[in-house]
Each structure stands twice: as C-alpha cells, then as structure tokens.
Image (cartoon, rainbow, N blue to C red):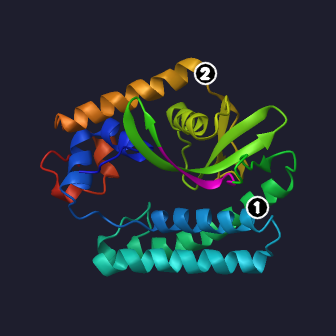
C-alpha cells in the first residue's frame, strides 16, 4: 500500500474503490494504452521547451517527443509485448492506435507550443527560492495526510498566480485537482493561488479559468483525510458500470466487472 496519497489515487478511489485495491495494493496486471505514452511524451517535451526559455526549435522538440513516446511504449511492451492485449480506440486496435496517437500527440504538442507563444502574458513562475514552476514536485501534508504530486505549470498572469495542468485527452480535470495544487503551493511557498485551468491538447487552448475558493481549499484537506481513512480501513467497495468498466485497466482481474 502506498505510504502517501495523491490526486490520481483520489481519482481512482472515488471512481471505484475496488479498482484502487487491484491497482495500488494487489498490483495486478494493467492493460497498456498508447494514450499513456502520448501524454508522457507531450508533457516531457513541453517541460523541456519551457526550461529552455521557449527557445527550442520545433525539430528539437519533436525529437524529444519521439524519444519519450518510444521509451514509454517500449516500457509497457516489456510487460505486454502482444499489442492485441493493449487498449484500442474506436476502430483502431492496439497496434494501430500506437501509430495514430504518435501522430496525434505530435500535432497536439505543436499546437500547445503555438498557443504559449501567442500568450506572452502567461509566464512561468519562479519561486523566491529559485524553484521553477514547471513539473514542480511537492510532498506536503494536507488534512494531516502525506500527499505527493507534480504540478505541470505555475503561471504568473495579470490576474495573479495560476495553476495549470496539461491534458492530452478529451476531458479536463476538476476543481479538486487544481485546489490541491494551490494548497500545496501555499504550504511550500506561502503564496495564495485562487485560479487554475487545463491546457487541452485536443483544442490547443486552455479551458476557461476555474476559480479556486476558500471552500475548495478546505475541501482538499477534508477529502484527503477521508481518502486516507477509507483506504486504511480497507473500504474497497466495487462500483461497476458500463462507463466505469469500459476503460478500466485492471478489468481482467475484477470479478465485479460488467461489459
């Protein structure tokens, strides 16, 4: 069992606590997905681009993306070399989806870079101690619980500091994730963050700005306390449904799964 909690643990547990048990505690086989490699590669390339002061040329950016995508696919293939067992997407089987998502991620990367170049008012924040707000790691206590994670970007904007998460999928995250990042920054640097957004690869633009209220911040502490107590008490109730089970990466090990 992990000795800490995270936003991703909360997302998994809140959707299906039994899925959390299978994945995080029992550590059963997880069905690979090329969209994971797509996300990893886009994030890695964006990180290097920002760290370069936005000076990397497109050709160098693409090489970073290619390397990260290839390494991620190979890492998953070491466990599951038969692409027939990988997640597909629509009419695309596992092998074809790898090729499709490689191209899709590359296109997303260039669109996200273009947006950032056209938005000079949004600048990467540098903390007073010199930490740079790119893939900024944190290890703090929220609700009396150890919580770890990484913040994709912390931005200086005309309206104040903003937390931003990059999404290569179709759906943005929720306020909870952004509020958790805001509370982590408060503990680490004693700064107030009252807004966030999601930079969407699908559109090449961020979502509308999402306000982070004091109630949202309070809820972060209460939620992580609840999550830790629930996991420690071994409350792992299944929550099967067509929607939940369709994209579950541990479905093959679940006796409650539905088709």
Q: Residue at x 16, y 38 (%)?
A: 234
Q: Give whichever of 125, 159 is nearer the camera.
A: 125
Q: Which mark is residue 178?
A: none
Q: Is residue 148 visible?
A: yes
Distance from disc 1 to disc 2, alpha carbons, whole Å, reads: 30 Å
Q: Residue at x 66, y 50 (%)?
A: 153
Q: Give whichever of 83, 196 is nearer the camera.
A: 196
**Mark 1 highlights which residue?**
113
Residue 15's place in the image compared with 78, above or below, is above
Q: Residue at x 34, y 44 (%)?
A: 12
In the picture, measured across the screen, residue 128 lies left or right of residue 247, that is right
Tell me the element at label 2.
loop
Q: Find out whether residue 76 is within the magenta segment.
A: no
Farthest residue to the top: give it: 215
Tell me the element at label 1.
helix
Q: Residue at x 26, y 46 (%)?
A: 20
Circle 1/circle 2 CB separation < 8 Å? no
Q: Which mark is residue 213?
A: 2
* Mark whose residue sits in front, 1 or 2: 2
Farthest residue to the left: give it: 255
Q: Quadrant of residue 34?
A: bottom left
Report the magenta stretch's main SS. Answer: strand
The stretch in magenta equals 131-139
Q: Quadrant of residue 224?
A: top left
Q: Find out whether residue 135 is within the magenta segment.
A: yes
- Count residues near mark 2 (Cα–Cα under 10 Å), then give few for <14, some for 14-19, many for 20+: some
How far across and down, in percent of the image, does residue 126 sit?
Answer: 74, 50
In the picture, measured across the screen, residue 215 lies left or right of residue 153, that is left
How far across and down, in percent of the image, does residue 81 sit?
Answer: 31, 81
How far across and down, in percent of the image, does residue 33 sit?
Answer: 40, 65
């Amino acid at each position: 069992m992990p000795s800490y909690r995270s936003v991703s643990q909360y997302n998994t547990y809140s959707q299906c606590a039994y899925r959390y048990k299978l994945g995080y505690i029992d550590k059963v086989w997880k069905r690979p997905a090329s969209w994971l490699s797509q996300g990893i590669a886009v994030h890695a390339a964006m990180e290097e681009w920002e760290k370069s002061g936005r000076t990397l040329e497109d050709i160098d950016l693409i090489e970073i993306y290619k390397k990260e995508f290839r390494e991620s696919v190979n890492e998953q293939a070491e466990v599951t070399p038969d692409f027939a067992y990988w997640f597909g997407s629509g009419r695309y089987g596992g092998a074809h989806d790898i090729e499709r998502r490689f191209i899709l991620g590359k296109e997303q990367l260039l669109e996200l870079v273009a947006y950032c170049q056209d938005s000079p008012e949004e600048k990467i924040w540098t903390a007073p101690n010199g930490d740079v707000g790119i893939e900024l790691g944190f290890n703090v206590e929220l609700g009396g619980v150890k919580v770890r994670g990484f913040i994709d970007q912390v931005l200086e904007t005309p309206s104040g500091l903003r937390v931003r998460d990059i999404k290569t999928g179709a759906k943005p995250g929720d306020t909870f994730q952004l509020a958790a990042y805001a509370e982590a920054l408060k503990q680490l640097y004693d700064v107030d963050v009252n807004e966030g957004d999601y930079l969407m690869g699908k559109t090449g633009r961020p979502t509308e700005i999402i306000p982070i209220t004091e109630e949202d911040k309070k809820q972060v502490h209460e939620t992580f306390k609840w999550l830790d107590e629930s996991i420690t008490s071994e409350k792992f109730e299944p929550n099967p449904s067509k929607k939940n089970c369709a994209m579950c990466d541990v479905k093959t090990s679940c006796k409650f799964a539905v088709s």
